[in-house]
Amino acid sequence: MSDVVATVKTVDALLTAYQSGERNFVNVMLPQSGLSGVDLKGADLSYADFSGADLSQANLRGSDLSYATLCEANLTGADLRGAMLLGTDLRESVLDKALLQSADYDPEETHFPSGFDPEAAEMKRDR
């Protein structure tokens, strides 16, 4: 774990580190956090825990969310275009009006909300 991630225990700490140019947030743990409208474009958020978080209207374009936990997260209107969602847990998350074009997913390991169709969302199968 990087020194930066070890110190990122709050939303404010995450945003401050991001604004100072940090992009490596592997394993960051911010479940149930209020992150509506944040800009984390291109950040490495793999293995992060954002379960139950409010990420509505967030800019996560091109971010790596591989193996992240986003179950029960609110991603309404979030920009996830080109994001990596390999093995990501999105069960029971809200993806209404989320932009998911060209986001990579693994059909065997990425978990979507019931009834969600990644092909209709123009996502890219990794295999």
Image: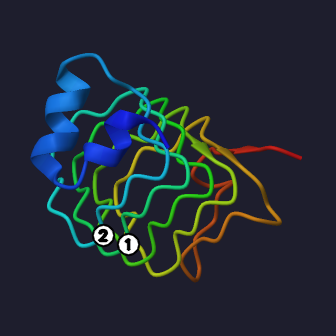
Single out the residue that lies furthest toward the top.
21
Q: Can residue 32 be seen in this view?
A: yes
Q: In which quarter of the image is residue 67?
A: bottom right
Question: Where residue 18 sits in the image (x, y, percent)?
Answer: 25, 28
Q: Is mark 2 on a helix, strand or loop?
A: loop
Q: Which amino acid does label 1 sit on?
A: Ser
Q: What element carries label 1?
A: loop
Q: In which quarter of the image is residue 31?
A: bottom left
Single out the residue that lies furthest toward the right.
127
Please give left or right for residue 82 compared with residue 50 in the image.
right
Front in this rendered view, residue 106 or 19: 19
Q: Residue 51 carries which label?
A: 1
**CA neighbours of label 1 inside 10 A, class few (<14), some (14 to 19), many (20+):** many
Q: Is residue 98 above or below residue 18?
A: below
Mark 2 = which residue?
Answer: 31
Front in this rendered view, residue 126 or 65: 65
User: Looking at the image, how many numbered discs can be counted on the residues?
Assistant: 2
Please give left or right for residue 123 compared with residue 59 in the image.
right
What residue lies at 57% left-to-right and 83% top-to-bottom?
114
Please give left or right for residue 92 compared with residue 103 in the image.
left
Q: Quadrant of residue 9?
A: bottom left
Front in this rendered view, residue 57 or 6: 6
Disc on the earlier residue, 1 or 2: 2
Question: Where residue 111 sits in the image (x, y, percent)?
Answer: 64, 71
Single out the residue that lies furthest toward the left.
12
